[in-house]
Image: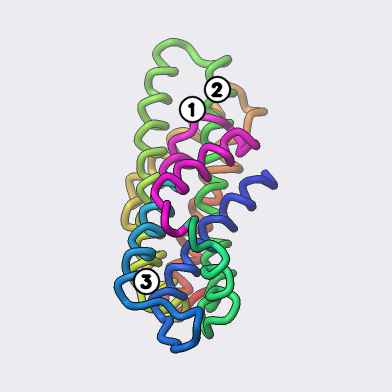
Amino acid sequence: MDLLRTAVVDITTLLATSHALRSSRGADELAMHRKQRIRLRREIKGGTLAYIDVLARSRRGTVDEALLVECRLAAELQMPQALEHQERLRHLLDHQAGSLDGLAAARQDLWRLAHIIGHLRMGMEALQEALTLFDTRSADALSSRLRRRLRKALTAYARGALRTKALKGRLIVMARAAALAEIGPRGAAEAERLADIEAGADAARRVIARGVTKPLLGLALDWQRNGSGPG
């Protein structure tokens, strides 16, 4: 899933750029007036959410070049002026103090969520071959609900990160809490049930158990344990 990491770097770079625009107050020739910064931040927020939406809704088991292009095109359609100012934004991101604070933690968090979604897709593809019609319907319904929760969790995390003033401290805590609230106890229960169905269909198949149920539990425990700050 190397391209998944590329996708998550794209998303966190958009987050960091948004925060750099919020914090920019310089008077040099590269500084932007307030209305322009607000307009660009609005575009980048729309682009970030559009990127995540395409990534989370895809039915591919892994992120390939085609999906990466789809995600980037969806984001670019929301950011016409930001694309015109790419060089200025890149310079701002490189030179704005604090714009990269917390970026590594946010990147890892988003990668963990997206990684779980990818394994859910792969696990369900494998299950289709081994289930009866009844079990397929049950598993499909559980998978659809869980996938929807995870997609909302990704979006909630990004929205939380975009709302907060700086990528540090409470930002990560708030973004994690928003994501966990979307998954909820029912999401964990759905993941457990899917792992049970997987084991009953073929004990050798452990894609969902290892790639969804266990990582989801670990994610919740980590984020709750590190509630006082980024892990």
Name the foreground residue: 121 vs 45: 45
- Residue that carries the numbered disc 2 in the rendered image: 127
Q: Dot 3 lies on which element? A: helix
Question: N-terminal of the two: label 1 or label 3?
Answer: 3
- Quadrant of the frame with the N terminus: top right
Amino acid type at mark 1? Ile
**Which residue, as the protein is rendered here, is positioned at the far bottom?**
27
Mark 2 crowd level (few <14, some 14–19, many ≥20, 10 Å Cα): many
Mark 3 crowd level (few <14, some 14–19, many ≥20, 10 Å Cα): many
Name the foreground residue: 83 vs 68: 83
Amino acid type at mark 2? Leu
Residue 60 is one of the magenta-drawn residues: yes
The label nearer to you, 1 versus 3, is 3
Question: N-terminal of the two: label 2 or label 1?
Answer: 2
- Residue that carries the numbered disc 1 in the rendered image: 197
* Magenta stretch secondary structure, dominant: helix
**Which residue, as the protein is rendered here, is positioned at the far top?**
133
Measure how far apart labels 2 and 1 are at the Cα level: 9 Å
Q: Dot 2 lies on which element? A: helix
Say which residue appears at 35% left-offset and 48% top-offset.
Answer: 152
Residue 110 is one of the magenta-drawn residues: no
- Residue that carries the numbered disc 3 in the rendered image: 37
Magenta part of the protein: which range? 53-82
Amino acid type at mark 3? Arg
Q: Dot 1 lies on which element? A: helix
